[in-house]
Image (spheres, helix red, strand yellow):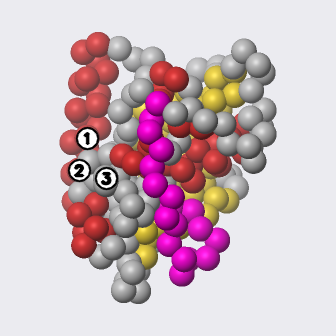
């Protein structure tokens, strides 16, 4: 099952698909016990990330990123999307707002996919945070159309401040890219596919 966010779809079809995705996500997560909630990136799991969410309207540029590199852009987007820290995040949607430096304006104003995750309250109770490791993706990166696309393989570890460890989560993050006037790229849409851990 993939969770898709492509803001170019409009009207009733878009609302119908979002409602269906939200229902499917909640059902799948209830049955399988896995989580759609994004998780924070950290090189040392014992040190929880502390960055607060940036407003979605602030599309700042990440000075460390080469915006002409599709894979680097998708990796940075995936880490931001899947990074959470319940000590500073009010909801799972805070992670989506942190993707602002990597996404196009239409995606920036679209609702995030999987934001109403059923595991969030459990994470809050455990004061959990996540770490994200990005690895190479060996599958097919082709998309439904001719737009450029990159795929990141994200492994997410959920850790409570009392030492609790949640199940390891793995996702393929498919990034549909769009070129900007200055030759750089941004993520214009994405799919989040849960994988077997």
Left or right of 49, for residue 181: right
Q: Are marks 3 and 1 in contact (CB under 8 Å)?
A: no
- Label 3: which residue? 91
| Label 1 Cα neighbours within 10 Å, binned few <14 / some 14-19 / many ≥20 | some
| Label 2 Cα neighbours within 10 Å, binned few <14 / some 14-19 / many ≥20 | some
- The residue depicted at 45 percent of the width and 17 percent of the height is 8
Residue 181: quadrant of the picture = top right
Specify start and end residues of the magenta stretch as a single range. 39-57
- Where is 115 relative to 149, above or below? below
Residue 46: quadrant of the picture = bottom right
- Label 1: which residue? 22
Question: Is residue 54 highlighted in magenta?
Answer: yes
Q: Where is residue 108 in the image (x, y as percent from the top left)?
A: 47, 30
Q: In which quarter of the image is the N terminus?
A: top left
- Secondary structure under the numbered disc 2 in the rendered image: helix
Q: Label 3, label 1: how many angstroms apart (C-alpha)?
A: 16 Å
Q: Are marks 3 and 2 in contact (CB under 8 Å)?
A: no
- Label 2: which residue? 26
Q: Between label 3 and label 2, give the one nearer the viewer.
A: 3
Q: Do the residues labelled 1 and 2 touch (CB within 8 Å)?
A: yes
- Where is 129 relative to 27, above or below? below
| Residue placed most toward the observer, 3 or 140 | 3
Mark with earlier residue (3, 2): 2
Left or right of 169, for residue 140: right
């Amino acid at each position: 099952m993939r969770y898709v966010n492509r803001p170019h779809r409009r009207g009733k079809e878009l609302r119908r698909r979002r409602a269906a995705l939200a229902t499917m996500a909640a059902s799948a997560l209830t049955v399988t016990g896995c989580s759609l909630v994004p998780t924070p990136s950290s090189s040392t799991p014992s040190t929880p990330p502390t960055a607060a969410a940036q407003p979605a309207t602030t599309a700042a540029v990440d000075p460390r990123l080469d915006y002409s590199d599709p894979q680097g852009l998708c990796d940075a987007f995936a880490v931001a999307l899947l990074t959470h820290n319940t000590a500073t995040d009010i909801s799972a949607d805070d992670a989506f707002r942190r993707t602002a430096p990597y996404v196009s304006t239409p995606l920036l104003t679209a609702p995030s996919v999987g934001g109403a995750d059923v595991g969030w309250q459990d994470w809050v109770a455990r004061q959990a945070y996540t770490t994200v490791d990005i690895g190479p993706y060996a599958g097919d990166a082709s998309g439904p159309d001719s737009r450029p696309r990159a795929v990141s393989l994200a492994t997410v570890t959920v850790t409570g401040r009392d030492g609790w460890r949640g199940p390891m989560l793995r996702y393929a993050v498919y990034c549909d890219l769009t070129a900007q006037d200055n030759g750089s790229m941004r993520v214009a849409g994405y799919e989040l596919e849960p994988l077997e851990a």
